[in-house]
Image (spheres, rainbow, N blue to C red):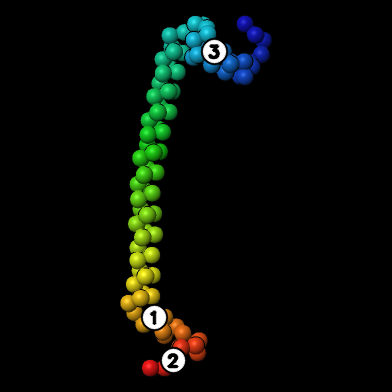
């Protein structure tokens, strides 16, 4: 057993064991690695699901802003009033 703890060496040994080069890990350590892998998978799935929802919400916000802008520009006299305010348009 080493006199000091070397985390890099320990990570390398675990990685080699995960890849199948060594079978020097205990049953408990094997269970821990499986649990850690499953937790990572679940975390990634949750992240993808939440990303999908936020993407839909942002799409709806942008679509609403664009359609609202098109409505104000083409179907109201907002632009005419704005131009009159700056003295550019004609008075009707």
Give x and y (percent) for residue 80: 41, 84
**Which residue is denoted by mark 2 in the rendering?**
90
User: Crowding at label 3, few (<14), some or many (≥20) Cα neighbours within 10 Å?
Assistant: some
Q: Quick check: 65 left or right of 13?
A: left
Give x and y (percent) for residue 71: 34, 72
Compared to 92, does 11 lie above or below?
above
Pair 3/2: label in front: 2
Mark 3 vs mark 1, CA separation in Å:
69 Å
Compared to 3, does 77 lie above or below?
below
Compared to 36, does 89 lie above or below?
below
**Which residue is denoted by mark 3 in the rendering?**
16
Which residue is at a point 37% across and 34% down the rendered structure image? 45
Mark 3 vs mark 2, CA separation in Å:
79 Å
Give x and y (percent) for residue 76: 34, 79
Q: Earlier in the sequence, mark 1 or mark 2?
A: 1
Mark 1 vs mark 2, CA separation in Å:
14 Å
Q: Quadrant of the C terminus?
A: bottom left
Residue 61: numbered disc: none
Q: Quadrant of the N terminus?
A: top right
Q: Secondary structure at mark 1?
A: helix
């Amino acid at each position: 057993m080493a006199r000091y703890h070397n985390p890099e060496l320990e990570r390398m040994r675990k990685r080699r064991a995960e890849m199948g080069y060594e079978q020097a890990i205990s049953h408990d350590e094997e269970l821990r690695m499986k649990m850690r892998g499953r937790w990572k998978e679940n975390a990634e799935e949750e992240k993808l699901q939440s990303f999908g929802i936020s993407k839909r919400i942002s799409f709806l916000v942008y679509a609403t802003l664009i359609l609202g802008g098109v409505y104000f520009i083409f179907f109201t006299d907002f632009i005419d009033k704005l131009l009159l305010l700056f003295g550019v348009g004609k008075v009707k």
